Amino acid sequence: MTTLNNRIATFKVLAIALLAFVTSLTSSCERDEVLIDIVQTQVTQPSYTDICGFYLLNEGNMGSNKASIDYFDATEGVYYRNIYAERNPTVVKELGDVGNDILIYGNKMYAVINCSHKVEVLTPDSAKRITQIDIPNCRYAVGHEGCLYVSSYVGPVQIDPTAQLGAVFKVDTLSLEVVDTVEVGYQPEEMAIIGNRLYVANSGGYRVPYYDNRVSVIDLNTFDVADVITIDEAANLHRVEKDSKGRLWISSRGDYFGSISTLLVIDPASKKVIKNMSIPVSDMWADGDTLYTVSSEWSYVTGGNAVSYAKVDMASMEIIDDNIIKDGTDASIKLPYGIAVNPLTKDFYVCDAKSYVVSGTIYCFDKDGCLKWKETTGQVPAHFAFNGRIEYK
């Protein structure tokens, strides 16, 4: 595949996974002796804050079993590439096929490996494998009150207009076993928790062109679908964030023809769209009430990608900036695929997936949008998890 949204439209099963190799204790930046002989590069000067670094999950090209994890150690200023394979040499096929999400929750790390149908559970201090949790066609994960919730397409990895409904799996983080499931909409993607309710964006991506336009609302007390929010303005739902006012920010990928990607603000109480931000979104990251977005919007009409960036004030629902990279480095970024923001320094990171079949690049920008450093990553760099004394995303 040569384009992000083309790949999404064709397979709809881009994965995102989570894993990590944390070289610090979860309660401090004091490092354990777990550094390993892997590809490493000094990319910047050491810095010492409550954030010790971050993990970057590389999806890997679908079907190639090339999902991998990189780690940036801020206390050294060193970028480590492909740490999972070295830490776990006996794991067959290494991390697996298509990493779709990464999450540090409690005292464990969780990596959602989409096409390998599993969630890898790792130790946060050494990135060593604890176990795997088998969940079919798993997509994204969130943690809440001792449980991990994982969205799943459930069915096989294939385009199928008759594809079955998806589900959310509930995992006990002590026993590391699936304890419950609930059926939701078609091909569920990202989720957000507000109060005791879990909001699940359904894409319907396998049922092209009959995309889903519903948000399933799960009552976490009963683990049943308590409500459904139907979004008439858009379909093929994907990303989800929440703001300080209890509103949902949900992206739509459109249909890659006349219906374009957009970002919607939804009031869960009234189940109404408050505002259509009218900006395309491939990935987004909420830093407090500031939302950073990147987009590589594929169109079958033009036969190409439209690349864009934005920064949004979630409180006022206004676009702050549509040019977050200020030094011209954006001209070197072919396909921005992932974005993350350091909650303390406000440095932000943009991942370039390039062609999906070669190594990507991560770019680090300061809060003013000027390049600090860049480094080669694994294939299709996408998902972040910061480690240290912070409240994990």
Image (tube, rainbow, N blue to C red):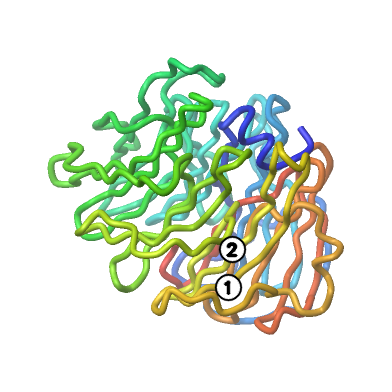
* Residue under the image location 42 percent in, 45 percent down: 141
| Residue 219 in view in this figure | yes
What secondary structure is marked by label 2? strand
Horizontal and vertical percent position of residue 156: 50, 18
Amino acid type at circle 1 is Lys
Side of 393 relative to 330 (left or right):
left
What secondary structure is marked by label 1? strand
* Residue under the image location 46 percent in, 73 percent down: 389
Side of 168 relative to 14 (left or right):
left
Q: From the image, which quarter does the N terminus lie in?
A: top right
Amino acid type at circle 2 is Thr
**Which numbered disc flags the more N-terminal residue, 2 or 1?**
2
Disc 1 target residue: 311
Q: Nearer the viewer, residue 139 or 327?
A: 327
Determine contact: label 2, label 1, CB under 8 Å.
yes
Disc ID at residue 293: 2
Horizontal and vertical percent position of residue 220: 19, 46
Tell me which corner region of the image, top left, top right, bottom left or bottom right, holds residue 324: bottom right
Tell me which corner region of the image, top left, top right, bottom left or bottom right, holds residue 293: bottom right
Residue at the far left in the pictured view: 222
Horizontal and vertical percent position of residue 114: 54, 32
| Residue 132 in view in this figure | no
